[in-house]
Image (cartoon, rainbow, N blue to C red):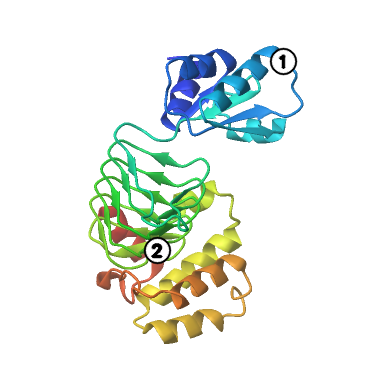
Amino acid sequence: MTDERKDQLTAEADGLIEGRNAVIEALRTEASIDKIFIQKGEVDKTLGHIASKARDAGIVVVEADRRKLDGISRTHAHQGVIALAAVREYVTVHRPPFEFLKTVIGDHVLLQAFVHVAHDCVLADRVTISNHTALSGHCQVGPGAVISGYVLVHQFTRIGALAMIGPTCMIGQDIPPFCMLRENNYITGPNTIDLRRAGFSNETRLAIRHAIKTFFFEGLNAKNAIAAIESDVRSKELPEVRMFCEFIKESKRGIMPGNPKFVGLPDDQRDELDTRA
């Protein structure tokens, strides 16, 4: 398989349709398209035709500079146009029962087959939700969070930015930013891979790891754990650590528990156990 074909398959998996002919064909076949980005300042007739057809179909058309399109692209051959077809087969997204409320789906959100998003949910940008997962009403999902397949999320639950949820979990309480929740419904540590992908520095990743360890694995109650994190002069001023603490303070449903087997263990032993899980 060529590198070009691999890039194309990756783009399709991410819900992206790139290039003029590909987007025109998607519009012709009435594919489910959420939004189309067209390069700002382009006067090409083909791009104008795409924009006109998209607006006639009720699709949002956004003018974006070349840098933004390059950042979105997976194939590096977008030709000045990228369509977001991020809702897969048999996905259901419900409107609220009252006209002054709204269900919100952010940009670059991927909802795979048979996902259900109930009324009044708010999904931030770059959220990925895998097959057969269901969010009850009023749930909030932070930027970059990933929810695996066959997960059930109770109403009014919040999932923080860059959190990672393992498959088949049943979530009845909040999950703080940057945390990994495994299939046993326990938080086991930071979402290490996505923290790296997001470009966080070593210092920031270590501070997040320390905050998660202090809150979940030092045997402290929530109040004392937050006080310990906020008293650490090395990390308390980092915005990511402040986000972690404020999320927990604002929780109304409580926080999903850490794995009790990990309490008091050093990082290397906890990581080894987590790898075996």
Q: Position of residue 88 (x, y in %)?
A: 36, 33
* Placement of 173 over or under 129, stated as above or below: below
Q: Between residue 255 and residue 227, name the one nearer to us.
A: 255
Q: Can residue 207 be seen at all in this image of the molecule? A: yes
Does residue 254 lie above or below 78 as drawn? Answer: below
Residue at 43% from the left image edge and 66% from the top image edge: 176
Q: Along the horizontal axis of the image, is 163 left or right of 275? A: right
> In the figure, residue 238 lies in which quadrant?
bottom right
Quarter of the figure that contains the C terminus: bottom left
> CA separation, marks 2 and 1?
44 Å
Residue occupying image coordinates x 51% and y 25%: 57
Of badges 2 and 1, nearer the viewer stands: 1
Q: Which residue is mark 2?
A: 158
> For numbered disc 1, what is the local secondary structure?
loop
**Amino acid found under the numbered disc labelled 2:** Arg
- Decide if residue 271 is on the left or right side of residue 127: left
Q: How many marks?
A: 2
Say what amino acid the circle numbered 1 marks: Asp
Residue drawn at x 32%, y 38% is 91
Residue 89 drawn at (x, y percent): 31, 31
**Residue at x 40%, y 63% (from the top left corner):** 158
Instruction: Bin the neighbour count of mark 1 within 10 Å (Cα to Cα): few under 14, some 14-19, many 20 and up.
Output: few
Residue that badge 1 annotates: 44
Residue 160, percent from left and from top: 45, 61
